[in-house]
Image: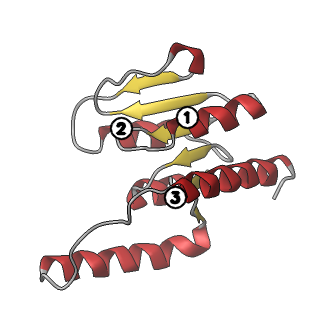
Amino acid sequence: MIYVDADACPVKPEVIRVAKRYELRVIFVANSWMRLPEDWGAQLMVVEGQFDAADDWIVERIQKNDIVVSSDIPLVHRCLQKGARALNAYGRAFTEQSIGEIISKRDLLTVLRGSGEVTGGPPPFQKEDRSRFLMTMDQIIQDIKCGK
């Protein structure tokens, strides 16, 4: 099963392409309605309510070896704790070993942004990012199939 934190996800078509190849179900979870092409065969779950309602919905349902696609570090951390696999749209895979350092770095950048030391956001999304995402997603699925 693949869960996608869909509100700002730029790789929705790529997720579908990989899911179809491996015959996996996909649920796009969002805070508001969005149009998904009918031929995708994916489910859209709109979760209204508090700020993290969509995140909570994913965490309540995700299971070991399910995959979550998200750049939301707290969501990714919660999913990893349940034995899920995780990656972001840039093709970065997250693990239990790497998430602590990522959280620390995120917290430091939040402080620096608050003090005006750091401005700006992530780099613009590129074609290479889509390719890296596809390779990483494929590798995660292969690892799950091989019991890694």
Residue sitting farthest toward the left: 115
User: At 21% from the left edge and 39% from the top edge, which residue is drawn?
Assistant: 50
144 vs 42: above or below? below
Residue 90's label in the rendered image is: 3
Taking 52 as reference, is 128 left or right? Answer: right
Rendering coords of residue 135 (x, y %)? 70, 54
Residue 38 or residue 83, whichever sits in front: 38
Taking 27 as reference, is 136 left or right? Answer: right
Residue position marked by numbered label 2 in the rendering: 54
Do the residues bearing badges 3 and 1 touch, measured as CB atoms within 8 Å?
A: no
Residue 38 or residue 64, whichever sits in front: 38
Q: Nearer the viewer, mark 2 or mark 3?
A: 3
CA distance separating discs 3 and 1: 14 Å
Rendering coords of residue 138 (x, y %)? 73, 49
- Quarter-of-image position of residue 118: bottom left
Residue sitting farthest toward the top: 38
